[in-house]
Amino acid sequence: MKYMMMDENRIAFMAVILIQAIYAGMFLVSKAAFDVGMNSYIFVFYRQAFATAFLSPIAFYFQWKDAPPLTFFTFCKIFMLSLFGIALCLNLYGIALVYTSATLAAATTNSLPVTTFFVALLLRMEVLRLKSIAGIGKLAGILFCMGGVGVLAFYKGPQLNFFNHHHLFSIHNPNHHSSPVALPNTWLKGCFLMLSANTLWGIWIVLQAFVLKSYPSKLMLTNLQCLLSSFQSFAIAIAMERDPQQWKLGWNLRLLSVAYCGIVVTAVTYCLQAWVIEKKGPVYLAMSTPIALVITIFFSAVFLGESITLGSILGGFLLVGGLYFVLWGKSKEQKISEGLKEGTKECNMEEGKDSTKLPNENPTSSVENV
C-alpha cells in the first residue's frame, strides 16, 4: 500500500510537470507563430477548429448516449460562454502576445486563480472574512497580484541577456514588434489586453459551474464550446483579415503551432488535469502553475531571443506570491470547515448515544414521573 501511494505521488508530480511544460510550449509556439507573421485572429480560429476535429469523435463515442438533453436556454448559455470565455478571450490573448512576450503570458497566468477568486467574490460564490487569518491571506494574495500586474506593466528595469544571441524563430521576421524597450506603448497595451484575457478566462471558469448544473456532461460541454467558438472565431477572423494568403497553412511553424495548441493543449491537458484534480485535488494542480513561468523564461530566451527584464521577473514573483497566499487562505478555510463538520458529526453521534442510553440507565424514571 505504501509503495502504491509513493508511485501515485510520483505519477502526479510528473503529470503536473508535463501539464505546465505543455502550457509553456503553448506560449512559445504561439509567440513564434506570431513572430513569423501569422495573423492572431486566424491562429485562434484554426486552433479551435483543430480542437473540435480532435475532440468530436471522442466525445460522441464516450458520452453521446449518456449526454443530457440540450435545451434552447442551455444552448444559449453555452453559446455566450464560448463567445466571451473562449473566442474573445483567446483573441485578446493573441493580440497581447503579439505586443508583448511569451514570458509575460506565462507570468500573468499565475494571476488566474486570484482573478477567478475575485470574480467569484463579486458573484458571492466566495466569502472574504477579514477578521480571520485565512481571509487576510486571501486579501494579501489579491494585493500581491495587483502589484505584480503593475510591475509588469510599468517597470522594466535592466535587461538580462544571458541567451539573447539565439533567434531560432524570430530571425525570419526581424522587424517583429515584440520588444518592450522599443515600443513601450504597445507593451502597456499588451499588458492591459493580457489582463483582460485572464479576467475573461476567470469569469469563464466561474460561470462554467452554473452551466454544468444544467448540462453536467463535461466532455460534451467542452466539445460543444470548441465547436461554437470555432464559428465565432471564424466570424471575427474573416472580418479582420481578408487576405487569402494569410489563411494558408503549409508544412511549417504555423501548422505546428495550431495543431499543438488545438490538439495537445486542449485534449491532453484536459485529461491530465482531470486526473490530477481527482487524485490530488485542485490546490495541488494550482500550486504547480509557476513551473510554466520558469520553463518559459528559459526557453523564450534561448529559442525566441527575448530579452528578459528585471521587471518581468519581479512581477512574476509577485504574481506567484499572490497565488500562494490565496491558495493558502483557501486551504486554511477548507481545513477549518472540515474540522467543524467532523465536530458536528461527533456531537450528533454522542447525542444519539446518550439518547439511546437514557431509557436503560433509569428504568424507574417513568414510574416516578407518574
Image (spheres, grey):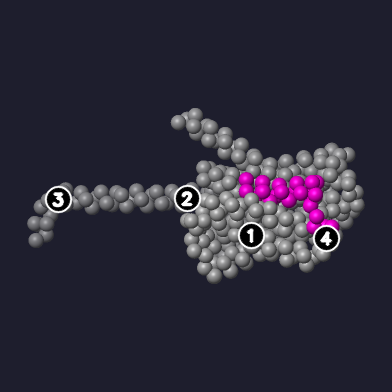
Do tag 2 and tag 1 residues touch (Cβ < 8 Å)?
no
> Which quadrant, please, contains the C terminus?
bottom left
Is any part of residue 49 visible from this angle?
A: yes
Which class describes the residues within 10 Å of circle 4: few (<14), some (14-19), or many (20+)?
few
Q: Amino acid at mark 1?
A: Leu
Do tag 1 and tag 4 residues touch (Cβ < 8 Å)?
no
Q: Amino acid at mark 4?
A: Pro
Q: Closer to the camera: disc 1 or disc 4?
A: 4
Secondary structure at numbered mark 1: helix
Do tag 4 and tag 2 residues touch (Cβ < 8 Å)?
no
Q: Residue furthest bottom?
A: 73
- Measure how far apart labels 3 and 1 are at the Cα level: 71 Å
Q: Which mark is residue 336?
A: 2
Q: Earlier in the sequence, mark 3 or mark 1?
A: 1
Q: Magenta span covers which residues?
A: 244-268
Quadrant housing residue 164: top right
Which class describes the residues within 10 Å of circle 3: few (<14), some (14-19), or many (20+)?
few
